[in-house]
């Protein structure tokens, strides 16, 4: 495999790299695992390190970063809860970004996608799949510890309410990160995409200091990345529940 010219990282996100490939900026994440590729993405090996192309057409998080998203991005040693991990395309990159000392609790409700997520977790030991419905957080609360960030991509009509309820329950402190991929076509045909975005921001504003939302065209039609940092007010909504202790469970848990 031929190495790209140069990989630039920064102090805040040491496992996120940018490289100029054929006159355009290409994002990479430093891989926790080794090949083969997860979804056909390019890998570049540099000595003991391996970088995976983080494709904006396949990942809304990558598209938002290329569109100058200034909100939170997962970084080293953090623990994140990922709602709607599907077969792990973006979740594997989130696991790369938090690195071997971080954890990603990856929730998915489709058994078929979950099976692929499970096999991915054999190579990404910091990715911990949970088969569960994000609408029922009490059913999996015993599997997830307090987390530093939530990433939600569930494409449901009530995606904002679901993500917010999980944030109130699982985020570990004010200032913790909240990021969601907002799919406006899932929110009904009664409003334009920008109207749905405004509704979502209004619903989130009391609980979060929001970063400017980013539109994900042309990579993901009708989608925005929305999010920011939890405000103390969010925790007033927290129900009294016992969460898991902050350590790694065995991968592939099924919520009771
Ligand atoms: N985040 C993925 C990525 O970038 O690789 C793509 C996610 S796909 C757009 C949405 C996923 O959310 C689907 O796999 C779907 O099964 C899952 N999903 C939808 N509703 C859910 C729920 N209530 N709880 C858990 N997963 C859900």
Image (tube, rainbow, N blue to C red):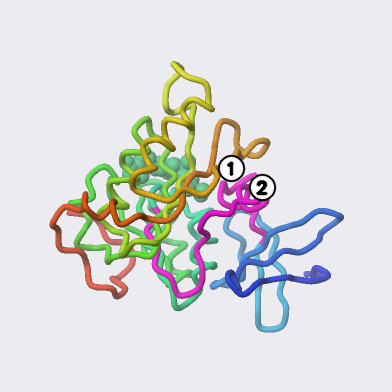
Quadrant occupied by the C terminus: bottom left
Is the residue indicated by label 1 positioned so its CB lies within 8 Å of ligand 1? no
Give 221 or 11, whichever is nearer the viewer.
Answer: 11
Residue depicted at 65% across the width and 74% down the height: 50
Query: In whole angstroms, how far apart are the C-alphas of marks 2 and 1?
Result: 7 Å
Res 110 visible: no
Quick one: which residue is furthest to the bottom in this view? 48
Element type where label 1 sits in the image: strand
In which quarter of the view is residue 156 placed?
top left
Q: Quadrant of residue 161?
A: top left
Quadrant of res 241: bottom left
Residue 214: assigned label: 1
Residue 67 shows which numbered tag?
2
Front residue (pair 37, 144) = 144
Of 165 and 46, nearer the camera is 165
Residue 207 belongs to the span the image colors magenta = no
Q: Secondary structure at mark 2?
A: loop
Q: Nearer the viewer, residue 217 or 117?
A: 217
| Residue stretch in magenta | 53-82
Q: Are marks 2 and 1 in contact (CB under 8 Å)?
A: yes
């Amino acid at each position: 495999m031929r190495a790209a010219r140069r990989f630039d990282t920064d102090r805040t996100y040491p496992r996120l790299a940018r490289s100029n490939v054929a006159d355009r900026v290409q994002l990479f994440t430093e891989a926790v695992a080794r090949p083969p590729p997860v979804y056909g993405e390019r890998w570049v090996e540099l000595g003991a390190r391996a970088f995976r192309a983080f494709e904006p057409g396949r990942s809304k998080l990558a598209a938002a970063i290329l569109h100058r998203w200034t909100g939170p991005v997962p970084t080293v040693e953090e623990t994140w809860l990922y709602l709607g991990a599907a077969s792990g395309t973006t979740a594997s990159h989130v696991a790369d970004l938090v690195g071997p000392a971080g954890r990603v609790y990856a929730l998915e409700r489709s058994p078929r996608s979950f099976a692929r997520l499970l096999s991915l977790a054999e190579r990404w030991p910091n990715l911990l799949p949970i088969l569960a419905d994000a609408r029922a957080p009490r059913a999996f609360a015993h599997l997830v510890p307090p987390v530093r960030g939530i990433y939600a991509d569930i494409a449901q009509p009530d995606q904002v309410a679901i993500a917010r309820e999980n944030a109130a329950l699982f985020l570990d402190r004010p200032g913790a990160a909240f990021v969601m991929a907002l799919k406006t076509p899932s929110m009904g045909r009664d409003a334009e995409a920008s109207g749905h975005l405004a509704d979502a921001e209004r619903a989130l504003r009391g609980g979060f200091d929001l970063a400017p939302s980013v539109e994900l065209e042309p990579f993901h039609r009708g989608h925005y990345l929305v999010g920011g940092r939890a405000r103390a007010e969010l925790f007033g909504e927290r129900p009294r529940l016992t969460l898991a202790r902050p350590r790694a469970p065995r991968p592939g848990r099924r919520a009771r």
